[in-house]
Image (tube, rainbow, N blue to C red):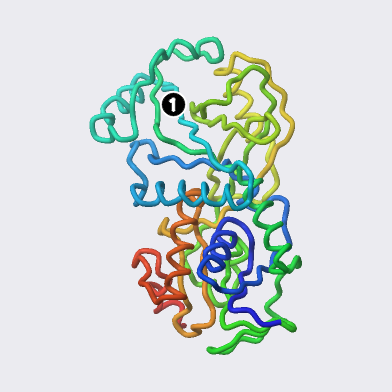
Amino acid sequence: MQVDYIVVGQGLCGTFLSYFLVQAGCSVLVIDESRPYSASKVASGVINPVTGRRIVRTWEIEKLMPFAVDTYRRLEKELEVSLIRQCNILDFHPTPQMQLAFAERIPVEKEYLRIPDNSDQWKEYFDYPFSIGEINPCWLIDLHQLLAGWRAKLSQQQSLLEERFSLEYCEITPEKITYKDISASGIFFCDGTEGFDNPYFSMLPYARNKGQAIIAHIPGLPRTNIFKQGISLVPWQEEHFWIGSTYEWNFKDLQPSPEFRQKAEQQLQHWLRLPYTIVDHIASERPANMERRPFAGLHPLMPSVGILNGMGTKGCSLAPYFAAELAQHLVHQAPLTPQVDVRRFTRILSR
């Protein structure tokens, strides 16, 4: 079998890179074993234009968000499924200091921040002594539909190999890749946390980061918004809510922890006025990195080997744009954004 490119992994990065390569007229083979608790499968699917306690806009969001929204809408038509809807964040301020901090940011970020109309309507559902801020627009992506829909499309086109990729079966030269009986001109690793141990890219400044969430059934809670007070309540599959998440930099394992569940339930009991039932508790490791910028491009010493990885918690907004940029780089030699080009690490990757 001969293809232009092999793509290892079918999370957000592998999905979008294979999509844009196909759009550019390339043939691809995606190799993915479909792990149930990969980072892309347990992520909330939220695109939020501001971030952190300082409530500042995220890096390059002015171009990333419109591009992402357009890409998800185009994929909706191609896959004939619903993938994206606007779902603004309602930020319930837990202290007067945070209420003031939000208010002070509104003139600076008036494009994304405002005080919602009729804040009192939410007192039926939540206990909150202070006001509410709204982040607008935010978008909610149905990652389950996206990943499953594109996987089905790849399978129909005989462009999917459902197995765990192993480098021991891969022969790599600067001009050619051979994996078992498959030949390609290049291979791209979009394999999330598996990339931590890839000998070609293991020297990159990855940062191991564990996230947890509980899935709960909350009858009567509107699904029109994302609700946030310390933790976030995000509309999820099958009429459930995704509740999380943590950013754990020191952890012993990737199992869901009783401590997280206890802390989340305490927060819900303090804040939520409706009864709820926990139906699942999930955890995964994110492919974060110390620079908080993705890794995209070709290995400086082995031009047949490339990467798209390191999206951290912002894959829904980052992956579409930089997958498209990488595809254009491969097909038309268009430049990569310097802050994401993996060749910024040429020195350490050349060791």
Residue drawn at 42 percent across, 73 percent down: 329
> In which quadrant is the N terminus drawn?
bottom right
Query: What SS does tag 1 mark?
Result: strand
Residue 260 located left or right of residue 34: left
Residue 171 located left or right of residue 117: right
User: What kind of residue is marked 1?
Assistant: Asp
Residue drawn at 41 percent across, 22 percent down: 93
Where's residue 351, x and y in %? 47, 83
Residue drawn at 36 percent across, 48 percent down: 61
Where's residue 317, x and y in %? 46, 50
Q: How many marks?
A: 1
Q: Quadrant of residue 273?
A: top right
Q: Nearer the viewer, residue 158 or 291?
A: 158
Q: Quadrant of residue 266?
A: top right
Q: Relative to 67, is 96 above or below?
A: above
Q: Relative to 303, is 219 above or below?
A: above
Where's residue 256, x and y in %? 69, 42
- Assess disc 1: are there few (<14), some (14-19) or many (≥20) residues with their C-alpha within 10 Å of its C-alpha: many
Q: Nearer the viewer, residue 131 or 328?
A: 328
Residue drawn at 50 percent across, 69 percent down: 24
Q: Nearer the viewer, residue 216 or 158?
A: 158
Where's residue 245, x and y in %? 56, 38
Q: Quadrant of residue 136?
A: top left
Q: Please, which residue is most extreme toward the left here?
A: 107
Q: Which residue is mark 1?
A: 91
Q: Relative to 60, is 331 above or below?
A: below
